[in-house]
Image (tube, rainbow, N blue to C red):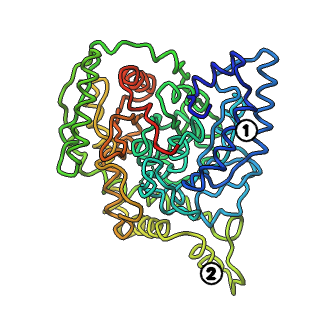
């Protein structure tokens, strides 16, 4: 039962082969049996899950239908869930029960999805390895000595290990696509503004975007359908109609123009990953796509620009955690300054503190122009590069990550080494574009992802290309041994 995709579950529920309650019990048992090896969940919500499953079964019995009605999912632990701990992977919020549901959580619940729990993540979504969580590192089910990627590493490991079919994630610089690539999943970061950020604890507000993580593009289409749409509570959410994503999975790739940026194949890329990327290109050619070499000349500036902008926004967003209103408060403060200093010093982990300091520095009066303003200008150049490229091609294709999953602890002493892993993913966030990672092969038994980027609001195009690829390949069906 645990091997089923969302699409298969929807068919099984519609055909009354099993109930949502039965399926939910099977998956909860599987989680309690197997998750101790992975540490992919921070909280389990068994009671809520069983309640939601029964309610979904009753809705089906009364004639309702819907692809998500009775479908088990989990939320990254930065989506606020009413009355349930929402920790953001931090000691700061270990005791925080959200007073309301994030829009994404509410929408999926209304569609009948069943929440099994809240998944582990890098603290405040800062990281690429899921090692900065207050709740401990998450292990990669493909090799328990390796990281699953981050920051949505809990969602990735849980779905890859078949603990559940799909989960939500968020992506500020790659946190959906990179862990998807490192665990053999399909993950989609939508266009900025496509999915509401209301109730999603902010890391870098101009970059953050929620999206689906699942094994197939078909399932990402189903989950995205339940997440996307205008939200009056989020002033950056965009009032554009939401297309039928599952209906977009039928397009032919005949004549589709795929651009492969020459800058992607620079020295930092593992040559074995480069080979797998080119093999995926050959596969798409067989399906009728036309390949073109393109250039994204400002790509080399993306990491420095991102690692100014994201910490700058984080330093501002995280100023609300002051020990006064909610979250962690230090013991016996002697005065207000001591309360602030120790609550923040004790409540935030080292990576979060590093980012707050970098961001506060970049925004300070003497350095604002030199760092923040400069980074924003680079951001525009990167966006312009994409706009020029999309005049010539329909999709941009390349590696999702320069390397496969590394060993736990391997990059801990050198934060910049970890930042460099984001080289292919952060440009989409800086430009606000949608991006998808799909399974494309293995290196030393570890999964490799190929990334597809499309113009604004072309999530359907990304999903269709990935779906056609998945109809003709079987990488996405491979299961990690022991799961
Ligand atoms: N690795 C990047 C960072 O640490 C991206 C994280 C994310 O997308 N949330 O900022």
Picture residue at 41% right of the left edge, 29% below the top: 456
At mark 2, the secondary structure is helix
> Does residue 455 appear left or right of residue 187 in this picture?
left
Quick check: 417 above or below 436?
below
Would you say the beta carbon of the disc 2 residue lies within 8 angstroms of ligand 1?
A: no
Q: Nearer the viewer, residue 248 or 433?
A: 248
Count of picture labels: 2
| Percent x, y of residue 473 | 36, 25
What percent of the width, then of the height, locates residue 19?
74, 26
Instruction: Choose top left, top right, bottom left or bottom right for residue 66.
Output: top right
Is 412 in front, or is 323? 412
Q: Is residue 82 left or right of residue 245?
A: right
**Which numbered dot is residue 337?**
2
Label pair 2/1, CB-CB below 8 angstroms: no
Q: On residue 300, which mark appears?
A: none
Q: Is 241 or 303 nearer to us in this picture?
A: 303
- 245 vs 78: above or below: above
Closer to us: 212 or 353: 212
Q: Which residue is mark 1?
A: 25
Considering the numbered disc 1 on the image, is that residue within a helix, a strand or a loop? helix
Q: In this image, 185 relative to 298: left or right?
A: right
Q: Residue at x 29, y 18 (%)?
A: 256
Sequence order check, earlier mark of 2 and 1 = 1
């Amino acid at each position: 039962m645990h091997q089923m995709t969302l699409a298969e579950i929807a068919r099984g529920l519609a055909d009354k082969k099993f109930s949502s309650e039965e399926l939910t019990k099977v998956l909860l048992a599987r989680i309690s049996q197997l998750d101790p090896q992975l540490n992919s969940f921070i909280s389990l919500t068994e009671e809520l899950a069983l309640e939601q499953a029964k309610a979904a079964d009753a809705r089906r019995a009364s004639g309702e239908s819907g692809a998500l009605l009775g479908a088990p999912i989990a939320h990254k632990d930065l989506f606020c869930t009413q009355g349930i701990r929402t920790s953001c992977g931090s000691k700061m919020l270990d005791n925080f029960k959200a007073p309301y549901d994030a829009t994404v959580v509410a929408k999926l619940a209304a569609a009948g999805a069943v929440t099994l729990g809240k998944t582990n993540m890098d603290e405040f979504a800062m990281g690429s390895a899921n090692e900065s969580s207050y709740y401990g590192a998450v292990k990669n089910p493909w090799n328990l000595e390796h990281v699953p990627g981050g920051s949505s590493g809990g969602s990735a490991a849980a779905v890859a290990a078949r603990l559940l079919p799909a989960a939500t994630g968020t992506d500020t610089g790659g946190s959906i696509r990179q862990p998807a690539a490192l665990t053999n999943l399909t993950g989609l970061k939508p266009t900025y503004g496509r999915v509401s950020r209301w109730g999603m604890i902010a890391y870098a507000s101009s970059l953050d975007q929620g999206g689906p993580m699942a094994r197939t593009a078909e399932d990402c289409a189903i989950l995205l359908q339940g997440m996307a749409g205008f939200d009056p509570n989020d002033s950056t959410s965009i009032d554009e109609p939401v297309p039928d994503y599952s209906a977009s999975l039928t397009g032919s790739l005949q004549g589709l123009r795929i651009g492969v940026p020459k800058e992607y194949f620079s020295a930092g890329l593992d040559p074995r990953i480069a080979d797998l990327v080119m093999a995926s290109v050959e596969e798409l050619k067989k399906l009728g796509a036309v390949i073109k070499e393109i250039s994204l000349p400002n790509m080399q500036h993306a990491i420095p620009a991102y690692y100014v902008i994201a910490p700058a926004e984080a330093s501002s967003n995280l100023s609300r955690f002051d020990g006064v209103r909610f979250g962690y408060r230090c013991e016996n403060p002697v005065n207000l300054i001591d309360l602030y200093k120790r609550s923040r010093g004790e409540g935030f982990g080292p990576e979060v503190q590093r980012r707050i300091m970098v961001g506060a520095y970049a925004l300070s009066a003497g350095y604002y122009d030199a760092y923040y303003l400069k980074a924003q200008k680079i951001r525009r150049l990167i966006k312009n590069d994409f706009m020029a490229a999309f005049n010539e091609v329909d999709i941009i294709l390349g590696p999702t990550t320069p390397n496969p999953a590394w060993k736990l602890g391997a990059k801990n002493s050198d934060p910049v080494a970890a930042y460099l892993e984001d080289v292919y993913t952060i440009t989409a966030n800086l430009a606000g574009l949608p991006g998808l990672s799909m399974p494309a092969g293995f290196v030393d038994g570890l999964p490799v992802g190929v990334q597809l980027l499309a113009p604004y609001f072309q999530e359907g195009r990304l999903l269709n290309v990935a779906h056609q690829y998945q109809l003709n390949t079987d990488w996405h069906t491979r299961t990690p041994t022991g799961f």
